[in-house]
Amino acid sequence: MRNLSPRAPLIAVLALGACSSSMSVEEARTTDVVTVDGVTLDGASFEQILLAAPPNAGPSAETANLVVSAFIDGALLRKALTGEVSLTDSATVARIIEPDAIRGEVRGAMLELAQTYPVPGDAAVDSVTRLGQRRVFQAIAVRYPPDLATDSAVQQAFAARIRGIYQEASEGGDFTALVRRNTSDSVLRARDGYMPAAERGSFGTGREFDALWRLEYGGISAPFGVPTGYAMILRRASVEESRRSMREWLVPELAAARNSAWLDSVRTAMQLTLADDALPRLRELVQEPLTGGGSAPLVTWDGGELSPEQARLWVSVLSPAERATLPGVPDSSLAVFLRQVADRYVVRQVTQGDTAMTSEAWEAMVPQLESALTSLDSAYRAPLTTGTPSEAVRGFIAAITSGSLPYRPLPGATVWVLRQGAQITINQRAIDAIVAAVQPVWTARQDSLAEAAQFGDGGGGAPAQ
């Protein structure tokens, strides 16, 4: 068994995408559009996968990117499942969990910083309550009976119960006592019905929900239902009664604003700077197979830098669907992504120096990784190892994209680790030709299915596929 070193050189090429001349769809169908260490996705199979795309993900450059990215992941995961590469040696495990460890360390550092901020006093909390941007309600929440939708007697009894509760509340009954007697949700009942501070529209939109926002302190709402299966009656809490919920909302809001200001000052002090050509190089880097971007730093700061290799690591953590969107996002979105990644390294440098991964992070994350890899093995070993490698991965991607096989993300930086040393070739000309050919066919098929669903097929049978 070959152990996959996280420091192995990345050998992947985009050799066939450089030529700008078009390709006929006939030629594209007989061409391998993706090759991963000899495992191939031919144009004809690629076409069938795109034709089977669901209504919310029609054939497009983004959908093509998704299929290509998922195929690469599937082909490399197959090698791990069959023992051709190892994901269990300590150096590889460290590289896989590195992004999650860094995020955890940064999150911990920011939480520690937030704990140093003063907690707002009652006067500050009350002033925010009076502004009215958020409000606190005390709720009676009664769960619908299981057979409410099918049994008229149950409906009548339940409606009578809710009317009785509402009448008692609106006539001045002790609302807290009503909460304790009637609320089905144990967490809400333990809080005497006081809900988290809510924004306008939190419960829904429309006239009846607008009326909630017009309630005076102590006002009672008419009963209404929510999609989670409860009938609710709300009472607007007083300023004093709102303090607990408002403070629970306000403290993290203030901490986030102060942390953001602190981070801005750190960026300035550390002279964090994006390279002049960082965005075009990042746009090149996020194109499959994630090998572009050059070698010069994308971001620099006092005492550190973000290299293209580190950027690839963080791109690989994204799901195939997220990776598929990156080539087409605006420069502003790429800049945000780049700064977020750089911020993690800067915060870690400022708060922890150049320390290695903590033993606590290792002990917390390794069991999670082992569990995730075991789950992947259980779910994907059979479909990825049945038949020839190319047939298995093609069938696997077809099942994933059609929804017949649930998608499970590769944990941590597994995608990046598996790509080390892999030979990946993408034929962009063939991909473009097939996408262009599939689009009108797919659209016509969707129109036909929609028409059949609306009017029937005239013979009582299933709509034509």
Image (tube, grey):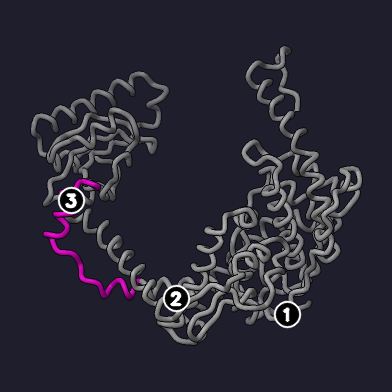
Q: Is residue 198 above or below residue 96?
A: above
Quadrant where the image shows the C terminus = top right
State the image coordinates of residue 99 (x, y, percent, origin top left). 55, 72
124 part of magenta stretch: yes
The disc, 2 or 3, on the residue closer to the chain's N-terminal end is 2
- Observer-side mark, 2 or 3, equals 3
Label ID, residue 459: none
The residue range painted magenta reads 111-134
State left or right for residue 271 relative to residue 279. Answer: left
State left or right for residue 301 relative to residue 169. Answer: right
The local secondary structure at tag 3 comes to helix
State left or right for residue 72 relative to residue 219. Answer: right
Q: Residue at x 84, y 60 (%)?
A: 16
Q: Residue at the far top: name it.
A: 458
Q: Is residue 374 visible?
A: no
Amino acid type indicated by mark 2: Glu
Badge 2 vs badge 3, beta-carbon distance below 8 Å:
no
* Residue identified by numbered label 3: 129
Q: How many marks?
A: 3
Label ID, residue 105: 2
* Residue identified by numbered label 1: 8
- Observer-side mark, 3 or 1, equals 3
State the image coordinates of residue 444 (x, y, percent, origin top left). 74, 28
The local secondary structure at tag 2 comes to helix
Q: Residue at the far left: name it.
A: 172
Crowdedness near tag 3: few (<14), some (14–19) or many (≥20) residues, C-alpha within 10 Å = many
**Quadrant assignment, res 1:** bottom right
